[in-house]
Amino acid sequence: MIKVGNKHYESGLDLPVSVPVFPLSGALLLPGAQLPLNIFEPRYVQMIDESLASDRLIGIIQPSVDAGVEQASDQVNDLCTMGCLGRIVGYGETGDGRYMMTLGGVCRFRITGEVDPGANLFRRCTIEPLLSDLESSDDGQEVNRELLLSNFRAYLEVNNLEVDWKSVEKASNVLLVNSLSMMAPYGPAEKQALLEAADIRTRADTLIAITEMVLAKDDSGGKWRLQ
């Protein structure tokens, strides 16, 4: 079971069979984490209006990072096959037609098809939720925390950044791994790999490997450049 905002999600019965989707390149939402968004396009403002009037759920997903790769006929070929359900846990209206909002991650899902949008401007897809995200008791105990933090320190040093180390040291392994995965300035393919990681340890190992490769290729005189 996972609690997001005021809602508990215990099984597939608590989740819809289709959701409005928000394709957003480079964005990463993970179960139990939060993602701030600035909504301004008319179709997505409409999507938020309808979501607020129903179950408050939307699907955050990236445009396909495998352009040109043939996919199964039942897949939506311009979107990645996996995304994450988010519940609107906070929002504000700016007065100029925009929403400033926060999504809380519920669980990951796979797209199984697309629904005719009818009069809607936004897209809606049928989904298969990864119910293991609701049932998981993974506390990240197998994460190599020392190596993860070592890579994090290297990133901060090459970018001349500082961090509240007291907060970092208090963070659980799960919070640490998921927060760093969402914050890291990686490209769409790397973000998708972090999303699709089977468990917290795998996600941590993936994050460590990506960081080490980027740092090893650094030839920019002390600045970490990501393509």
Image: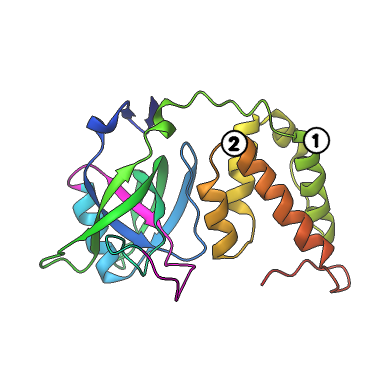
Question: Label 2 belongs to which residue?
Answer: 200
In the picture provided, is 61 more to the left or to the right than 176?
left
Q: Is residue 6 above or below residue 150?
A: above
| Amino acid type assigned to the residue bearing label 1 in the image | Glu
Secondary element at tag 1:
helix
Secondary element at tag 2:
helix
Q: Is residue 145 above or below residue 17?
A: above
In the picture provided, is 164 more to the left or to the right than 199?
right
Q: Is residue 219 above or below residue 32?
A: below
| Amino acid type assigned to the residue bearing label 2 in the image | Ile
Residue in the picture at 41% in, 42% down: 104
Residue in the picture at 66% in, 48% down: 206
Q: Which of the 4 image quadrants contains residue 158?
A: bottom right
Q: CA distance from mark 2 to mark 1?
A: 15 Å
Q: Which mark is residue 116?
A: none
* Residue situated furthest right in the rendering: 221
Question: Label 1 belongs to which residue?
Answer: 146
Contact (CB < 8 A) between labels 2 and 1? Answer: no
Predominant SS along the magenta part: loop
Q: Which residues are magenta?
A: 53-71
Q: Is residue 159 visible?
A: no
* Residue situated furthest left in the rendering: 118
> Disc 2 or 1, which lies upstream in sequence?
1
Q: Is residue 33 magenta?
A: no
Residue in the picture at 56% in, 57% down: 191
Q: Is residue 70 magenta?
A: yes
Residue in the picture at 89% in, 72% down: 221
